[in-house]
Image (cartoon, rainbow, N blue to C red):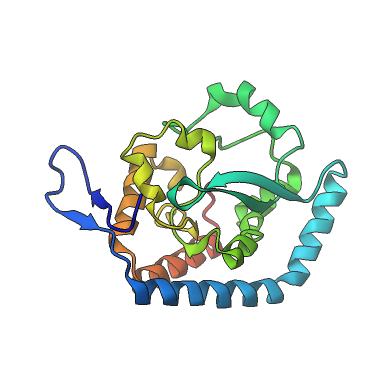
Amino acid sequence: MNNNAVLQLGENGDYSESVVLERKRLYSFLKRFFDITLSLFALIVLSPLFLVVMILISLWDKKGNPIFVQERCGKNGKIFKLYKFRSMCMDAEALKAKLQKYNEMDGPAFKMKDDPRITGIGKFIRATNIDELPQLVNILKGDMSIVGPRPPLPAEVAEYSERDKQRLLVTPGLTCYWQASKARNDISFEQWMEMDRQYIADRSLQTDFKIICKTAYVILAHHDGR
């Protein structure tokens, strides 16, 4: 994929126009500047919270590392290591196959509202989105941006259609249209993909700012979802 790829919006004539992914050099420069500045500031300010959360996770389950590292797909499908606070039991990946029949999300993604793999402290840090905060390190490194499509698992991408892969044209983010939705658990996989394609078409500093504000509102209003 390259910066001149054409993104078709909609199917079966839903939209007549196409969006060309241009370089947008000034936007890209400012976006990266804000990513570095805000992520570094947040890491410094939130460092006491990081320490407390890591201690609580370790006390709850002493068997594993409080930081969960998982391979995800970034821009153009490049694999990188994503960081999260561990919210599940140590054998969560092994148990996933047994729970597949309870998957509440259509498509290749796995979502389960009452996932038994989530620990007690894990429920709290997920409900408050605290589990995602270590991704500030990913943003600082350049693997991710503050705003962009959520980075998928390689196994999920393997099941993507060519149309679904269009969401990989840009750097993935900590939040996006889907993440900022009050009822994202009720959004179908195809609707999710369409929201990411729409973000690529809409992307601007103004759009990013609106998504950040909406995400903050959703978190503060305690709207739970994954």
At 12% across and 41% down in the image, what residue appears?
13
Q: Is residue 201 visible?
A: yes
In the image, taking residue 223 as reference, residue 46 lies left or right, namely right
Q: Is residue 109 visible?
A: no
- Residue 213 point in image, percent of width and height: 45, 70
Quarter holding residue 40:
bottom right
Q: How many marks?
A: 0
At 56% across and 24% down in the image, what residue appears?
100
Quarter holding residue 31:
bottom left
At 34% across and 54% down in the image, what residue appears?
2
- Residue 37 point in image, percent of width and height: 57, 78
In the image, taking residue 115 as reference, residue 213 lies left or right, namely left
For this rendering, which residue is in front, 111 or 73? 73
At 43% across and 75% down in the image, what residue appears?
29
For this rendering, which residue is in front, 44 or 72? 72
In the image, taking residue 117 as reference, residue 140 lies left or right, namely left
- Rendered position, 126 above or below 158: below
- Rendered position, 193 above or below 20: above
Quarter holding residue 203:
bottom left
- Residue 69 point in image, percent of width and height: 69, 47
For this rendering, which residue is in front, 190 or 4? 4
